[in-house]
Image: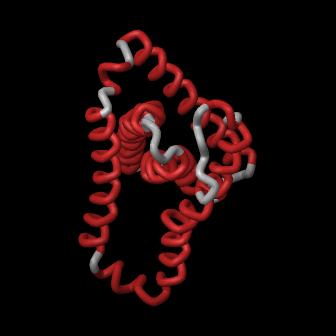
């Protein structure tokens, strides 16, 4: 959540005002309204609704995954409509994807090293690993829409879309390998 709160401030600091990317002065408040406030309200309502939500886990899972699917769909649809798949040629797309993979790998390595340095147990380390590298498109798309309103948001979030697809694939492969290791360990015991 700290990243969501600091993102507009970092963008304002890192992107010069004469770069042609106008950051809306009300962007921070819009991000609070669309991302942080719903999160805070959900946490406050958890004691009241937690048991009901747990009993209706299938429905909440469908809504959760459906909302992520809609965000991803809207991001890629905007990209298709704006022609980003034709605007970026294959060598540049490969170079961008390689950079995205390197950044994701570095982030995952730093997350694991930090967790180990903090003395985390394996279950906590795994939670840190997955949570530390995910939620990129679900929070990034709404923030980009707010921060870069009126601009070609699809082109701006192209690296984010590539990151999201890559992290889904990488985390799925890692999860499958970990599940096989657990099954092998259980069978050996």
91 vs 3: above or below: above
Q: Residue at x 36, y 12 (%)?
A: 90
- x, y percent for residue 179: 37, 45
From this viewpoint, is residue 49 visible? yes
- x, y percent for residue 143: 51, 51
For residue 4, which quarter of the picture? bottom right
In the displayed structure, does residue 86 sit left or right of residue 111?
left
Counting every numbered tag in the picture gives 0
Q: Residue at x 35, y 20 (%)?
A: 87
In the displayed structure, does residue 112 sit left or right of residue 67?
right
Q: Residue at x 27, y 40 (%)?
A: 77
For residue 51, which quarter of the picture? bottom left
Q: Residue furthest bottom?
A: 48
165 vs 41: above or below: above
Q: How is the image coloured?
A: secondary structure
Which sits in the foreground, 165 or 185?
Answer: 165
In the displayed structure, does residue 2 sit left or right of residue 61?
right
Which sits in the foreground, 115 or 177?
Answer: 115
- x, y percent for residue 55: 30, 81
From this viewpoint, is residue 187 visible? no
Q: Residue at x 44, y 48 (%)?
A: 141
Which sits in the foreground, 99 or 51?
Answer: 99
Which sits in the foreground, 86 or 169?
Answer: 86
- x, y percent for residue 172: 36, 40
Q: Quadrant of the N terminus?
A: bottom right
For residue 158, which quarter of the picture? top left
């Amino acid at each position: 959540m700290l990243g969501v709160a600091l993102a507009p401030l970092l963008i304002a600091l890192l992107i010069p005002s004469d770069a042609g990317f106008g950051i809306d002065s009300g962007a921070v408040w819009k991000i609070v309204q669309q991302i942080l406030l719903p999160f805070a309200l959900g946490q406050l309502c958890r004691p009241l609704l937690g048991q009901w939500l747990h009993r209706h886990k299938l429905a909440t899972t469908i809504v959760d995954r459906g909302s992520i699917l809609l965000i991803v769909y809207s991001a890629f649809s905007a990209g298709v409509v704006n022609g980003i798949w034709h605007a970026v040629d294959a060598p540049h797309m490969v170079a961008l994807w390689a950079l995205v993979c390197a950044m994701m790998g570095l982030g995952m390595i730093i997350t694991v090293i930090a967790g180990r340095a903090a003395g985390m147990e394996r279950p906590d380390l795994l939670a840190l690993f997955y949570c530390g590298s995910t939620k990129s498109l679900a929070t990034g798309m709404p923030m980009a829409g707010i921060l870069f309103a009126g601009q070609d948001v699809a082109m701006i979030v192209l690296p984010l879309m590539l990151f999201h697809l890559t992290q889904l694939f990488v985390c799925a492969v890692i999860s499958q390998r970990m599940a096989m290791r657990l099954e092998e360990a259980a069978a050996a015991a």
